[in-house]
Image (cartoon, rainbow, N blue to C red):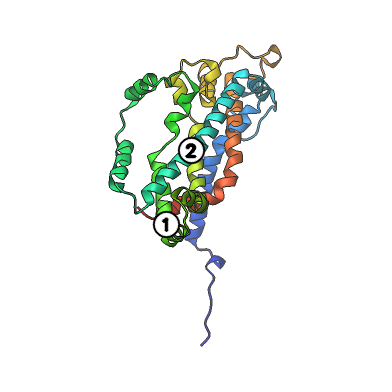
């Protein structure tokens, strides 16, 4: 009797077609705001008075980008955001992975105490006013450190990494101990290289969160322009529509709306460029970091 082999990918049924249509619609809904922002940033401001831009600019111009790129506040806020994101990313990954490695170790004394001590801080938070008081009393207010120190550790990220570490074969740890390796060397030479997917995932979360942050500037600084974060600069540009620094040659070509569109596109470029390098680890890191608890 002959056996027939059926390849699942060779045939499409009605359900498959519906799934693809739904996914295409969701992809369009996700991408269209970005496309709309690009089109608006490249369109002449006077022309937008005759109707919104839906897909492509009706009257193309680089004026909005020229004005935004000539604003000194853009560069200072960009550097503040870049350095706060970069420093936080490196230090947070090191500190969080250290704690995660210790928590995942079965031989850790007082493991339950440290575990619940971390969980309590995640579920019970003092709130905005106590946080503000701590920032002021510790001398972090209106300094660059306020962008760094409060972001160096996250319990949620620690749980993701510790679950990943628990999935690593115990025989690797035992073999390293037999060879005379210490805990720091085991963590750095064995666990960290194996945890690249989880580290890339957590690192992407940290980077996106810091890059999109504006509340620390609003709450914990005197709002001096030289200490602004980029997202706070964008918020000021969108809300206040400051056109005072625009040169006369660009009058009519730009507006507060087109300037904000251009600034938004410029601010998203670093994250868009960063994502392809970590995307291959993203799904794997999430799944493997959630298998054990």
The foreground one among 11 and 91 is 91
Taking the view exactly as shown, the residue that stands out farthest to the front is 180
Task: Give the residue drawn at x 37%, y 22%.
Answer: 132
Image coords of residue 114 (percent x, y): 31, 43
The foreground one among 183 and 67 is 183
- Per the model, the C-alpha gap separating discs 2 and 1 is 23 Å
Question: Disc 2 marks which residue?
Answer: 206
Relative side of 193 to 71, left or right: left
Q: In this view, does 72 lie above or below 109?
A: above
Classify mark 1: helix, strand or loop.
loop
Question: Disc 1 marks which residue?
Answer: 167
Q: In this view, does 254 lie above or below 15?
A: above
Taking the view exactly as shown, the residue that stands out farthest to the bottom is 1
Task: Give the residue drawn at x 48%, y 59%.
Answer: 179
Can the viewer see residue 208? no
Task: Give the residue drawn at x 41%, y 48%.
Answer: 101
Classify mark 2: helix, strand or loop.
helix
Comes first in the chain, label 2 or label 1: 1
Image coords of residue 40 (percent x, y): 61, 28
Image coords of residue 126 (percent x, y): 30, 28
Query: Which label sits in the foreground, 2 or 1?
Result: 1
Quadrant hosting residue 233: top right
Q: Is residue 284 above or below residue 219?
A: below
Image coords of residue 43 (percent x, y): 65, 26
């Amino acid at each position: 009797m002959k056996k027939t082999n059926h390849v699942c990918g060779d045939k499409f049924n009605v359900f498959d077609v519906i799934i693809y249509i739904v996914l295409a619609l969701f992809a369009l809904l996700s991408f269209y705001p970005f496309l709309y922002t690009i089109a608006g940033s490249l369109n002449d401001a006077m022309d937008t008075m005759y109707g919104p831009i839906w897909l492509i600019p009706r009257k193309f111009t680089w004026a909005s980008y020229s004005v935004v790129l000539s604003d000194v506040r853009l560069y200072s806020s960009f550097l503040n955001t870049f350095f706060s994101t970069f420093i936080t990313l490196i230090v947070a990954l090191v500190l969080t992975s250290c704690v995660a490695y210790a928590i995942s170790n079965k031989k850790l004394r007082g493991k339950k105490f440290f575990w619940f001590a971390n969980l309590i801080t995640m579920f019970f938070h003092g709130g905005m006013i106590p946080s503000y008081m701590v920032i002021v009393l510790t001398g972090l207010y209106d300094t660059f450190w306020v962008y760094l120190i409060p972001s160096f550790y996250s319990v949620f990220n620690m749980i993701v990494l510790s679950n990943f570490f628990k999935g690593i074969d115990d025989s690797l740890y035992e073999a390293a101990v037999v060879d005379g390796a210490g805990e720091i060397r085991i963590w750095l030479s064995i666990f960290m290289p194996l945890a690249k997917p989880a580290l890339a995932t957590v690192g992407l979360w940290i980077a996106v969160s810091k890059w999109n942050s504006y509340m620390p500037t609003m709450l914990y600084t005197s709002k001096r322009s030289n200490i602004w974060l980029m997202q706070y600069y964008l918020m000021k540009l969108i809300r206040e529509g400051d056109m005072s620094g625009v040169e006369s040659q660009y009058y009519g070509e730009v507006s507060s709306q087109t300037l904000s569109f251009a600034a938004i596109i410029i601010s998203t470029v670093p994250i868009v460029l960063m994502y392809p390098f970590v995307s291959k680890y993203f799904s794997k890191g999430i799944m493997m970091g959630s298998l054990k608890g």
